[in-house]
């Protein structure tokens, strides 16, 4: 029974949708995100891209017509930080490829372990998500206040061995995926950021102290600069000893060169200030994730031009570094001029919370337009994908969702989901389980029990 269900799930995940065709979505409220809403209009998809949108756009001859019946059309939602495709069952070590042990640190590349047949990818699409950043977690720290329940088992459930040199402080390198059904490779980009933690998680990784964490991070960046300038000498053994391996140093070189950002997971206001100071001193780009006390230093974050990824549900202190958490954190950050991306629970099976979290932020003062941008254009910009996705503009890839109502409301859901102009199947392991056990025959039992 289990084997047949797993085979059916895999078939669902790998089912090839129809090829891209010309589609006209009519009678829709169109939310371009990059511009004002179109109360009633038409959006045309052709050759996998957005060909036209507006209030008076004509339907091309031969196009497939989808009548939205007053529903809402948005860009496909972007998960700002997740382990989608890199982790399947939180308590099963063999299914977790979202963290590494001490054998690697900054060099760990999460893209190599992404599974396009993950049963959670169709589930994410059912929530309107068409792309996602896949971001590694720091192994061996047991998670942190800014992380979610699934990450608490990382220490026990990711492989690795203790190595020599400095402690492993960096989680690895992030990737970006688009949720195309049937694709053999869904990775759009890799090595997009190197992750590191400050605060309680970083202190644990460094041996128990925030100060040690920051000193070791600065030392690692200094080593990466020295390695980059004297790589030939390093290969000949003619340099001083470094605290990281050759692979980890090489992964940090684009960071110190300002080409690749450092994604810093941080919660407390004082630690956020340390992150901003680190970026200024080292002349590196950073992204902040978590930022539960960000509202306390919103002006400083805005002045530094640093984007943030927040979870608006994080309003009850889960630790001492979250004592200032509050529901209007996203609204206050936005009001100060910070670019805010909103995340759902970052674990694979709760990405549907993203749009609901955006709705929660809107209910607590975030302007609606900013709420919609926080799950579309802002995360696309953070991950360097805004030239292709994140808004409804002519020439961009047709990652498009048709909703039966306001996408930030709990009572709305997607009616049609397009990735690259191809309509995606609306089937998942969850719907298969429902169908398998919901229907009964004359005996009163579902077929699975016969």
Image (tube, rainbow, N blue to C red):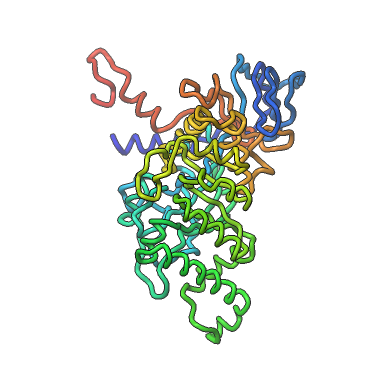
Please tell me which residue lies in front, 343 or 97.
343
- Residue 411 in the image: x percent, y percent? 47, 20
Residue name at image x 48 percent, y 30 percent: 360
Please tell me which residue lies in front, 367 or 71.
367
- Residue 336 in the image: x percent, y percent? 60, 41
Is 25 placed left or right of 295 in the picture?
right
Whether residue 275 is visible to the viewer of this picture, yes or no, is yes
- Residue 379 in the image: x percent, y percent? 58, 42
Residue name at image x 64 percent, y 19 percent: 28
Residue name at image x 59 percent, y 39 percent: 334
Please tell me which residue lies in front, 194 or 313.
313
Is 412 placed left or right of 304 in the picture?
left
- Residue 298 in the image: above or below residue 437: below
Please tell me which residue lies in front, 311 or 433.
311
Q: Quadrant of residue 36?
A: top right
- Residue 53 in the image: above or below residue 5: above
- Residue 441 in the image: above or below residue 382: above
- Residue 270 in the image: x percent, y percent? 47, 54
Quadrant containing the C terminus in the rendered view = top left
Whether residue 186 is visible to the viewer of this picture, yes or no, is no
Q: How many marks?
A: 0
Quadrant containing the N terminus in the rendered view = top left
């Amino acid at each position: 029974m289990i084997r047949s269900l797993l085979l059916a799930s895999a078939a669902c995940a790998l089912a090839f949708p129809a090829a891209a065709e010309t589609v006209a979505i009519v009678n829709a409220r169109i939310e371009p995100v990059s511009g004002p809403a179109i109360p009633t209009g038409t959006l045309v998809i052709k050759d996998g891209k957005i060909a036209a949108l507006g209030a008076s756009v004509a339907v091309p001859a031969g196009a497939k017509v989808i009548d939205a019946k007053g529903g809402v059309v948005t860009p496909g939602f972007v998960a700002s930080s997740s382990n989608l495709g890199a982790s399947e069952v939180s308590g099963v070590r063999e299914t977790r490829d979202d963290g590494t042990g001490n054998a690697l640190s900054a060099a760990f590349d999460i893209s190599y372990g992404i599974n396009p047949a993950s049963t959670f990818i169709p589930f994410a699409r059912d929530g309107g998500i068409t792309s996602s950043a896949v971001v590694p977690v720091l192994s061996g720290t047991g998670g942190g206040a800014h992380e979610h329940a699934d990450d608490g088992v990382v220490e026990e459930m990711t492989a690795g061995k203790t190595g020599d040199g400095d402690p492993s402080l960096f989680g690895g390198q992030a990737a970006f995926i688009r949720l195309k059904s049937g694709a053999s490779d869904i990775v759009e980009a890799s090595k997009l950021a190197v992750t590191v933690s400050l605060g309680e998680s970083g202190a644990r990784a460094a041996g128990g102290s925030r100060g040690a964490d920051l000193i070791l991070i600065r030392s690692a960046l200094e080593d990466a600069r020295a390695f980059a300038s004297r790589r030939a000498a390093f290969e000949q053994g003619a340099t001083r000893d470094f605290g990281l391996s050759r692979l980890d140093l090489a992964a940090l070189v684009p960071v110190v060169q300002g080409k690749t950002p450092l994604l810093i997971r941080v919660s407390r206001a004082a630690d956020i200030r340390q992150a901003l100071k680190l970026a200024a001193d080292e002349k590196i780009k950073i992204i902040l994730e978590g930022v539960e006390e960000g509202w306390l230093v919103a002006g400083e974050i805005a002045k530094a031009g640093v984007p943030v990824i927040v979870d608006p549900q994080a309003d009850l202190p889960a630790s001492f570094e979250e004592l200032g958490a509050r529901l209007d954190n996203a609204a206050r950050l936005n009001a100060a001029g910070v670019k805010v991306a909103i995340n759902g629970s970052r674990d694979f099976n709760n990405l549907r919370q993203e749009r609901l979290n955006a709705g929660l932020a809107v209910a607590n003062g975030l302007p609606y337009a900013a709420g919609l941008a926080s799950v579309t254009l802002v995360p696309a910009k953070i991950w360097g994908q805004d030239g292709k996705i994140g808004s409804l503009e002519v020439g961009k890839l047709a990652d498009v969702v048709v909703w039966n109502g306001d996408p930030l409301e709990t009572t709305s859901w997607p009616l049609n989901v397009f990735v690259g102009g191809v309509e995606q199947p609306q089937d998942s392991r969850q719907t298969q389980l429902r169908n398998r056990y919901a229907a009964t025959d004359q005996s009163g039992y579902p077929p699975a029990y016969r």
